Amino acid sequence: MTDSSVFYRSRKSYPVAVRGEGVYLYDADGRRYLDGSSGALVANIGHGRAEVADALARQARELPFVHGSQFSSPVLEEYAARLLAFLGLPGFRFWGVSGGSEANESAIKLARQYHLERGEPGRYRVVTRVPSYHGASLGALAASGMGARRAIYSPLMNEAAWPKLPKPDPTLSGEADAERLRAVLEEAGPGTVAAFLCEPVVGASDAALAPNPGYHARIAEICREYGVLFVADEVMSGMGRCGAPLAVRLGGEVTPDIVVLGKGLAAGYAPLAGLAASAEVYGTVMNGSGAFKHGFTYAGHPVSVAAGLSVLEIVERERLPERAREQGGRLLAGLRELKAKHPGVLEARGHGLLLGLALGDPATGQAYETPGAADRVARAAWERGLITYPGTGALDGTRGDHLLLGPPLSISDAEVDELLAALDGALGAAG
């Protein structure tokens, strides 16, 4: 659109979306798209839910804004209590912000302040994994192990503050895989590490990669042993997306010190993300300096929180975590059939409705040396009315094409079949 005043994200041509209904989006030319990635795995309840729009309008009329340094609000108090009950985090406290990057920034800062309040000012490092993605803001990006998005900003980062652990290894037991954290902590200097931050099921940086059962439980044990906070980034994987309220618990009962949330909280109806902090973390900060030395103007915004409350009611009423398990099983079975049919699909994997395809050279069974396969498949899918989420760089920042799939949790059987048919055609066309 050459006459536009919009600063677009890239030079490609952008259709104008005008309406959403269920799993579909419609553009200004009347074309329909099956939203096979829920945008960026955001639209968990589907598009066009009138009851959420009504909740937004009621809250905007009643109380559109208060600043979090001055007031709480009835809707925030109710939402925090109901959300934490849904997540199974009794005694935790909810800190609301506008997006996942802000939420991870908040978690990083909270981990740092927690150790200061405990009299350990030397703890500032945050261990994360390669690959990983925790957000676009500078701190969250520094924490990320995603070379393509990170490289040009590296001069702005203190790389020593962000030690990296290799990604989950499916050939290892969960416990043995987690034990690799110990070596990273020892090398960094255990007394310098504030937190270990990871995605329970990896999203954008290595589509739907997850460790074996037992991994997160052992991670939690190692973190306790070393006095390090365990932070679970559930921005993409939480709120039922992986078939449970929290993906960190898929392999057993685990309670991190901080859980980071986003995307599915308000399911795209308003900007909403946040973190849940344990009673120990919250109490240490409040009983120390008496305040979290951090904040955002729109933190706990009443209208966004009202959207979150309405979305949570739908998630619970329609049992969407259970639906994600059921429909995810159906979709994953179909993806495995496509893997058998299309040699360029090396792996089909995931949990619930956070699923991915790893793409590569069928002659070698390895990633392509030159990226581009995922983009080719995504373009071919788009031509067939299917939106996907392509990525690359999972192996070394450049190689490792993959395709992420995550339709709304409300997707029907027929819509799953439609998605698979379009993807089948796209894989065939892309070669």
Image (cartoon, rainbow, N blue to C red):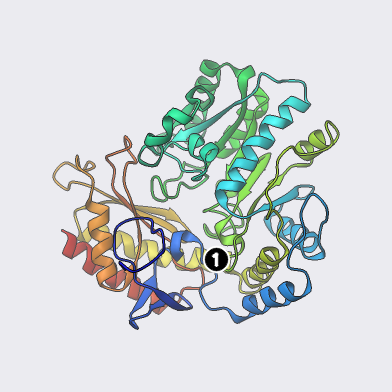
Q: Is residue 431 left or right of residue 122?
A: left
Residue sitting farthest toward the left = 363
81, 178: nearer the viewer: 81
5, 278: nearer the viewer: 5
Q: Which quadrant of the rendered structure holds the N terminus?
A: bottom left
Circle 1 sits in a helix, a strand or a loop, which is it?
A: loop
Total count of labels: 1
234, 273: nearer the viewer: 273
Q: Residue at x 20, y 53 (%)?
A: 344
Q: Quadrant of residue 333?
A: bottom left
Q: Residue at x 73, y 55 (%)?
A: 84
Q: Which quadrant of the rendered structure holds the C terminus?
A: bottom left
Q: Which residue is mark 1?
A: 268
410, 14: nearer the viewer: 14
Q: Which amino acid type corresponds to the residue marked 1 in the rendered image? A: Gly
Point out residue 147 in the picture as x, y percentages from the top left corner.
37, 37
Q: Is residue 357 left or right of residue 242?
A: left
Residue 214 appearing in the image:
no
Q: Residue at x 50, y 45 (%)?
A: 135
In the depicted structure, whether residue 108 falls above or below residue 275:
above
